[in-house]
Image: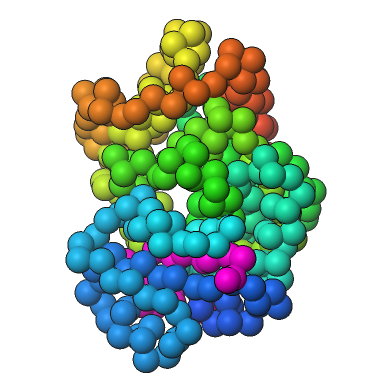
Amino acid sequence: MKKVTIVIPNYNGKHFLKDCLDALEAQTYKDFETLVIDNASADGSAEFIRENYPWVDLRVMEENLGFSGGVNEGIKLTKTKYVILLNNDTAVDKNYVGELVKAAEKDKRIFSVSAKMVCMHDHDTMDDAGDLYSVLGWAAQRGVGQPVGDYDRPGFIFTACAGAALYRKSAFDRIGLFDLLHFAYLEDIDVGYRARLYGYTNVYAPKAVCYHVGSGTTGSKYNSFKVKLAARNSVYVNYKNMANWQLILNAPALAAGHLIKMAFFYKKGFLKDYVAGLKEGFATCRKCKRSVGESTFITQLAIEAMLIYGTAVYAFEFLKRRLK
């Protein structure tokens, strides 16, 4: 049996698949298998894979299950020690898989390993070095827009970006899979946050390099669908993972975060979508299963410190981008 299964969710991403799969075929580390979960694509993706990549295990869904549903199907089919979730709009370095495994093998408490994600069309610029989360209720890509050389050190992160990360399969058996209520967006923040509540850690492996287009499935950085779902899911993340005392303590910061986002999306023309997402989130959050009950007060306190730290890092990197 192989040690790793690479799960690639795909929805109408035929134009990305050649670069993605060719890069996997060129890996120096060979102890892995590749599984593509096709979310009922209508662009010939399945036929393209069958004709050109017979070594890929292809599973075609009857409907679009979203990112959460698609990767969950892949994880459930996996029998290996590790699962790598990889976006279709990526091309990875030849040592990518091996470096992720090497990082995960250092400690059994590691839940996820986030890759060094570099902008596909600008190899000098970072896309993601693991994700941040803040007391404002904002998730952020650590390092986005920064020079690649500034993120060469491994270390602990709040959560991994599921666009190119390795996960310990046995941990999913304990904490559960990605939340289907999310469908897409912030589901990786949620599962990484949940893992921390169970006592796991998340780390960054800078030698595992992945080149990423970004928004390959939705087609743009901001659109009505994405803004609404991300707003709704931000409510879910906080309700599920923050203890009651954290929700009370962070309430002013969370409210400020929503007001700032409203002003931002007003300028972008998506205010109605953002507000609609928040309304849906608050109206339906009780459908979510709360994860915080699995944690101790000390764990919650440590996470609160991470949220404060994440806010400071976000502010620092934001100012660096603005001052360029």
> Is residue 305 shown left or right of residue 186?
right
Nearer the observer, 30 or 158: 30
Q: Position of residue 303 (x, y in %)?
A: 60, 23
Which colour style is shown?
Answer: rainbow
In the displayed structure, 165 sits above or below 323; it is below
Q: Is residue 295 visible?
A: yes
Image x and y of residue 132, in percent? 58, 36
Left or right relative to 272: residue 254? right
Q: How many marks on residues?
A: 0
Residue numbers of the magenta segment: 1-19
Q: What residue appears at the point 68 percent right and 59 percent down from the top-left corner?
A: 100
Task: In this rendered view, identify the residue nearer to me: 23 or 176.
Answer: 176
Q: Is residue 302 above or below residue 92?
A: above
Q: State the residue at coordinates (58%, 82%).
A: 25
Nearer to the camera, 154 or 288? 288
Quadrant containing the C terminus is top right
- Asked which quadrant contains residue 284, the reply is top left
Query: What residue occupies the far bottom of the structure in this picture?
Result: 51
Relative to residue 237, is residue 69 depicted above or below? below
Residue at the image point whose x is 44% and y is 66% from the top: 8
User: Where is residue 95 shown, x and y percent of the image?
Assistant: 71, 71
Residue 196, placed above or below residue 118? above
Asked whether the viewer can see residue 213, the reply is no
Residue 28 lies in quadrant: bottom right
Relative to 255, 302 lies left or right:
right
Residue that protrudes farthest toward the front in the picture: 1
Residue 5 on the magenta segment: yes
User: For this rendering, which residue is in front, 272 or 65?
Assistant: 65
Q: Position of residue 258 (x, y in %)?
A: 38, 24
The residue depicted at 69 percent of the width and 60 percent of the height is: 101
Where is the N terminus found, in terms of image quarters? bottom right
